[in-house]
Image (tube, coloured by chain):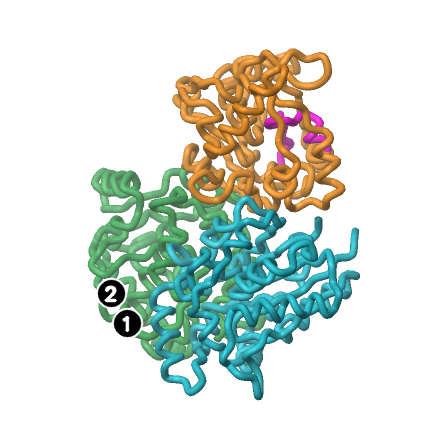
Chain colours: A cyan, B green, C orange
Amino acid sequence: MSTLEFVLVHGSWHTGECWDEVKASLEAKGHRAFAPTLPGRGPGQSTDVTMRDYADAVAQFVVAEDLAGIVLVGHSAGGTVVCKAAEQLGDRISRLVLVSPLLVDSGSALTDAVPPEYAGLFAHMASESSDNTIMAPWEVWRDSFIGDAEETLARKAYERLCAEPFGPVSEPVDLEAFAAMPIAKSYINCTEDVVFPIGEYGLFPRMYQKVAPCRLVNAQGSHEMMYSNPHALAEALVKAGRP
Amino acid sequence: MSTLEFVLVHGSWHTGECWDEVKASLEAKGHRAFAPTLPGRGPGQSTDVTMRDYADAVAQFVVAEDLAGIVLVGHSAGGTVVCKAAEQLGDRISRLVLVSPLLVDSGSALTDAVPPEYAGLFAHMASESSDNTIMAPWEVWRDSFIGDAEETLARKAYERLCAEPFGPVSEPVDLEAFAAMPIAKSYINCTEDVVFPIGEYGLFPRMYQKVAPCRLVNAQGSHEMMYSNPHALAEALVKAGRP
Amino acid sequence: MSTLEFVLVHGSWHTGECWDEVKASLEAKGHRAFAPTLPGRGPGQSTDVTMRDYADAVAQFVVAEDLAGIVLVGHSAGGTVVCKAAEQLGDRISRLVLVSPLLVDSGSALTDAVPPEYAGLFAHMASESSDNTIMAPWEVWRDSFIGDAEETLARKAYERLCAEPFGPVSEPVDLEAFAAMPIAKSYINCTEDVVFPIGEYGLFPRMYQKVAPCRLVNAQGSHEMMYSNPHALAEALVKAGRP
């Protein structure tokens, strides 16, 4: 089996560290993996950032490391980030892998793609915050994001979350150039993902349909299975990322 | 991992004995489990019972055993029973776990929640019976309830079924008080459950949507996986029931 | 556990050889398995065939081998073939097993049951061919048919494909007699099957609904899991085929 090079892009509230165990698991299988942190999160970082800043950060990371033929992976809102970054990276990408992604139609914002009650909650949180950021409430995190983990792990992961800048979440994203790119894609469906209730606003199959036809890989776990089931996610990434 | 106390409430045609192997499996993992039998079934029992009788029986069992901090589990129609019982048990419950449940909106009957052809069949069966009871036909049982078991096991389980009083199945259930309770819930989706055909009247995700947002745990098996795959169900119960 | 006799009917572009590993796996479990090749494919075969020819070939095979009490299995378009063949075989069949089947309503053609863009593509391919045949494009094969295989296996399986006669795919199929037969059925859902995009034209649960109520068995793999996960498919066939 060929060696793959993964660039793993995290979703909202996370940093590159969320991939630590997945990265170790991929490396143990003989692959290489990188997990940059998007701007706007962590101590001392300005939260006044844009989706373009995110995409630039990913593209600059790939260019700075001089990577080519990569499997570019985006989790959750990171799915939209990698689509936008792909517009700059073109042929450096062998395949895009979307893990329980939150994707938007070009011209829409992430807040247009989430259940209306969440969009309202996030807007309220951002306006109440001092720095235009939002946070996932513990109860929602526990059962809707990471219901498959023991409570101790759920708490540990929760404590690692950062406030998420609301700007990139609420601004319309132009993906016209991406839509025209003939790029191979795979979709990892985390089968216990209920980050949004199943149905009209559920991630799956709604997001899958945005990128179909596309390879589908199922992985048993919640939206946060990089914490709760990292080895299964690493296996799914290999199945999703290989040629 | 903490020790959990489960109270397992069976569904239609069953008694507490249906949980025997699941109970043993939970106990082998260090947990405690109780499986009371609802009134109205078995030799010498009057079938003139109500949903309130069911809920009272569960509540009285929990109080008599002086249990607190329990994981209250309801399977199939037992899902509605535990919702109703929760109205009386309040803080004695740490979490409600619904296993392939048949749930109703407050003011509706279970027969309103099943496919119309089943509702008609049940009403006809009850009117033809001498004691207002219904039974699952063997062919339906074999392929729609327990299609994942070997035939011998399917027959053995079928022979243990009791006639089900039709009263609690066909009476409207008031769940206004339950709907207002802020109780943590988990949902176990038995992934090969086709007790009702997938689609408009399928259990999943229709019943999940009634209780979302809610932790989701998938378990591979049919509606009757307490017989066909009891260890997997016990594992799912632990994942669903823990804090 | 009783010994089962399987007759395995392949789908479009395949021959009986596609079942080689599944057949070996079933035999290793103590069962018997046969995998005839439908007419109209392979060197020297006329591609001027009909759905009736397919059904006759299956029925004649079963009669010639003097098989009875068989589990008749149809994969993909082979699902429609076994329904049509069942009209002739009647009591020789103990159970029909449909594996990710493409089924039609009586009076419709297979092309009526596929996404319109595929129907258009196939009609165009057939008219451009010298012998009224169609082929699955590599890119579609790779990610939509067999996305769970390593690329080497995907290519090897692709190289074994035959041109598929378009006649049986585009002619209306009369299944009135089949619809009236009280025949036990099981459905194997390959959980990573995205041969048609999930949703309006996805195989599952659309095809399941055509045969429900019916035993459901899930098997993890793509549409072509006879290549990518033959042992899991063999296990699923036993669960689906037993009484």
* Circle 1: element type: helix
* Residue at 42% from the left image edge and 78% from the top image edge: B69
Q: Residue at x 54, y 14 (%)?
A: C50
**Mark 2 residue type:** Leu
Marked residue nearer the N-terminal end (2 or 1): 1
Give the x, y percent position of residue C94.
53, 26
Quarter of image, res C218: top right
For badge 1, the amino acid type reads Glu
Q: How many marks?
A: 2
Magenta-drawn segment: C1-20
At a point 27% along the width and 68% down the height, the residue shown is B179
Q: Is residue C6 magenta?
A: yes
Q: Chain of mark 1?
A: B
Q: Residues within 10 Å of mark 1 (few under 14, many from 20)?
A: some
Choose between A60 and B158: the one closer to the eye: A60
Residue under numbered circle 2: B175
- Kindly identify which chain the residue marked by label 2 belongs to: B
Q: Is residue A243 above or below residue A108?
A: above
Which of these two is toward me, B118 or B181? B181
Which residue carries the number 1 mark? B87
**Residue C64 x %, y %:** 64, 12
Answer yes or no: is residue B174 visible. Answer: yes
**Residue in front for this viewpoint, A13 or C209:** A13
In the picture, residue C231 is in which quadrant?
Answer: top right
Regarding mark 2 in the picture, which secondary structure is present there?
A: loop
Give the crowd class for mark 2: few <14, some 14-19, many >=20 residues within 10 Å. some
Is label 2 in contact with label 1 (beta carbons under 8 Å)?
yes
Q: CA distance from mark 2 to mark 1?
A: 8 Å
Query: Does the rendering let one see residue B11?
Result: no
A211 over C56 or under it: above or below = below
In the rendered image, the quadrant that contains the N terminus of chain C is top right
Q: Is residue A141 left or right of residue C2?
A: left
